[in-house]
Image (tube, rainbow, N blue to C red):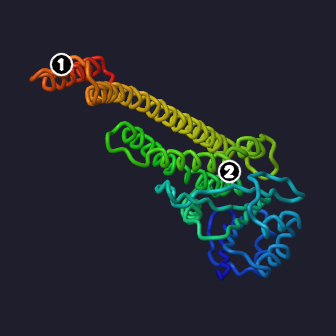
Amino acid sequence: MTTPRVRTVACLSGVSLERNVPSEEIHEYLKERDNLVWVDVQDPGPAELAMLQEEFGFHPLALDDIAKGHERPKVDEYKGHLFAVMYGVLDGAVTEAVRTVEIDLFIGRNFVVSVHRERFPALDDALTRWMRGGAMLKEGVGFLVYTLVDAVIDTYAPVLDAIENDVEETELALFSPTRTDGVQALVKLKRTLIRLRRVLYPLRETFQIFLRPDHAYFAPGTRVYFQDVYQHILRILDGMDVERDLVSAALDANLTLVSHQLNQTMRTLTVLTIAVGTLSAVFGAWGMNVGGLPAADTEWGFVVIVLGTVLLTGGLLVVARRRGWM
């Protein structure tokens, strides 16, 4: 059983930062409009959910979504806060073991609460970036939300690059004489792309809430940053579509190659069947204990029949070979 972990960082008037703020003192920091509080909750239990309800007054439906998990990516607007659900990628450089983790964000006038079920290193990077924001800290909650969302979206880039490399290598392996499980690898890559696209594509529409110019929580100066994240989402989705098309094209090419090889095999078997049939017909007829067969009673008849049959069969094989039937 995992142990809940709560981290709290407060930015005082866009100037100083305080780490490890006690949970019971959060409301004191929130009273000052110029303060900004970030609470990160990992593996929340009933006590942590009760603390969020008490300190922030989050909507029960949003807290219920957190308790159940596996929510569809979305951005819901409640009185006093936004509730955003998105997914980041873990182990993005290894396409065989790509895992996603749900990140839930509560966004208010001067606070952000992030909730997730396991450790997500991208949030640590986001914390470092935010604390080094300098003058951007005065932009308030907008800059913090941008830092978090951008860190989450950036986790898709390594897995997309890894999939591109795997597709190229698998395509080359499909046409090698020693190809083995290329089709299986392509199917796995296609499933990975579909799974990632399913958790990222909804943000293409719901992210428009962050881009509204008259948003009550975000300063006008942060809109350009959200626009950059939105363009990043579109680029990743376009890249996923391209990679999915490449995988589908590789699978179609493999099917065509298999069909061509099957046709070639059938032609070869047809030629061999004719050759064996010729040998069987000739030797079967001359092997009968009947009279009247050509050269059956001569001294060199057997040799002539054997050589003639072998030459006929060999000539057939040579013609078939030259015409590409074998």
Q: Secondary structure at mark 1?
A: loop
Label 1 sits on what residue type?
A: Ala
Q: Residues within 10 Å of mark 2 (few under 14, many from 20)?
A: some
Q: Locate residue 69: give its quadrant.
A: bottom right
Which residue is situated farthest in the left direction here? 299
Q: Nearer the viewer, residue 260 or 172?
A: 260
Q: Is residue 143 left or right of residue 299?
A: right
Residue 154 in the image: above or below residue 290: below
Q: Which mark is residue 156?
A: none
Q: Position of residue 194 (x, y in %)?
A: 62, 46
Q: Position of residue 299 (x, y in %)?
A: 9, 23
Q: Position of residue 75 (x, y in %)?
A: 78, 52
Q: Is residue 267 left or right of residue 307?
A: right
Q: Which mark is residue 199?
A: 2
Which part of the image, by quadrant, shows the C terminus? top left
Q: Secondary structure at mark 2?
A: helix
Q: Position of residue 59 (x, y in %)?
A: 88, 65
Q: Nearer the viewer, residue 321 or 120?
A: 321
Q: Residue at x 71, y 41 (%)?
A: 204
Which residue is situated farthest in the front direction here? 291
Label 2 sits on what residue type?
A: Val
Q: Which residue is mark 1?
A: 295
